[in-house]
Structures are given as structure tokens and as C-alpha cells.
Amino acid sequence: MSKICQITGKKAMGGCNVSHSKRHTKRTFDVNLFHKKFYWVEQDCWISLNVSAAGLRTINKIGLDAALKNAAEKGYLYA
């Protein structure tokens, strides 16, 4: 499973570790992902999503149904 939030579309980024001597080595900045189950009232079923911390706040703010509709429009949802 790739490290992508299914609500916000956030992905792992690349970057560099920079030491005190300014030497650069490659690294990745991973997303703060959680595998969570949500109860979807409109469909009367449980769904499991890979959601970042920002995605959890989005779901709390606008609701699960609206967050899923926005994610589907932008193409972030996958099976």
C-alpha cells in the first residue's frame, strides 16, 4: 500500500538530510498516515481508509460524506 492519504492526497516527499558539515544525503519525509475504519451513515456500512492527520481533521470539520465526495472528485480514492 502506498503512502498516500485517501482524503487529502498527501504523498511522501523527497529531500535531504543536511549534516553540520553541510553534507547532503537523500531521505524521505513520510506522511503521518493512519489506517482507520469509519462508519458511513449514508451508505449504512463501515469503510477503511488510509488517512493522514490532516485528513482526520478534514473529516471532523466537514463530515465523512462531504470529504469522500471531494476526494472522489479529485481522484484520491482507490480501492
Image (cartoon, grey):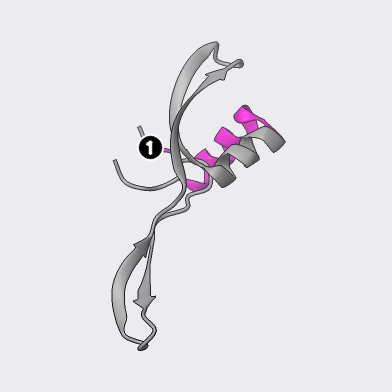
Residue 70 is inside the magenta segment: yes
Q: Quadrant of the C terminus?
A: top left
Position of residue 2 measured from the top left corner of the image (x, y, whole percent): 31, 46
Q: Secondary structure at mark 1?
A: loop
Q: Residue at x 42, y 55 (%)?
A: 11
Q: Amino acid at mark 1?
A: Tyr
Instruction: Give the labeled residue for mark 1.
Output: 78
Above or below: residue 3 compared with residue 22: above
**Front-most of residues 19 and 14:** 19
**Which residue is nearer to you in this view: 29 or 73?**
29
**Total number of numbered discs in the rendering:** 1
Position in image of residue 69 (x %, y %):
58, 35
Residue 4: give x, y in percent of width and height. Answer: 40, 47
Q: Is residue 69 magenta?
A: yes
- The residue positioned 56% from the left and 19% from the top of the image is 40
- Report the residue that reaches farthest toward the front: 20
Decide which of 31, 22 is in the foreground and name it.
22
Farthest top residue?
44
The N terminus sits in image quarter: top left
For label 1, count other residues whose C-alpha is less than 10 Å away and answer few (under 14), some (14-19) or many (20+): few
Q: Is 1 on the left or on the right of 52, as rendered?
A: left
Q: How far across and down, in percent of the image, does residue 62 sit?
A: 70, 35
Residue at 37% x, 87% y: name it: 22
Give the main secondary structure, helix, strand or loop, of the magenta stretch. Answer: helix
Q: Which residues are magenta?
A: 62-78
Left or right for 79, reference 40: left
- Farthest residue to the right: give it: 61
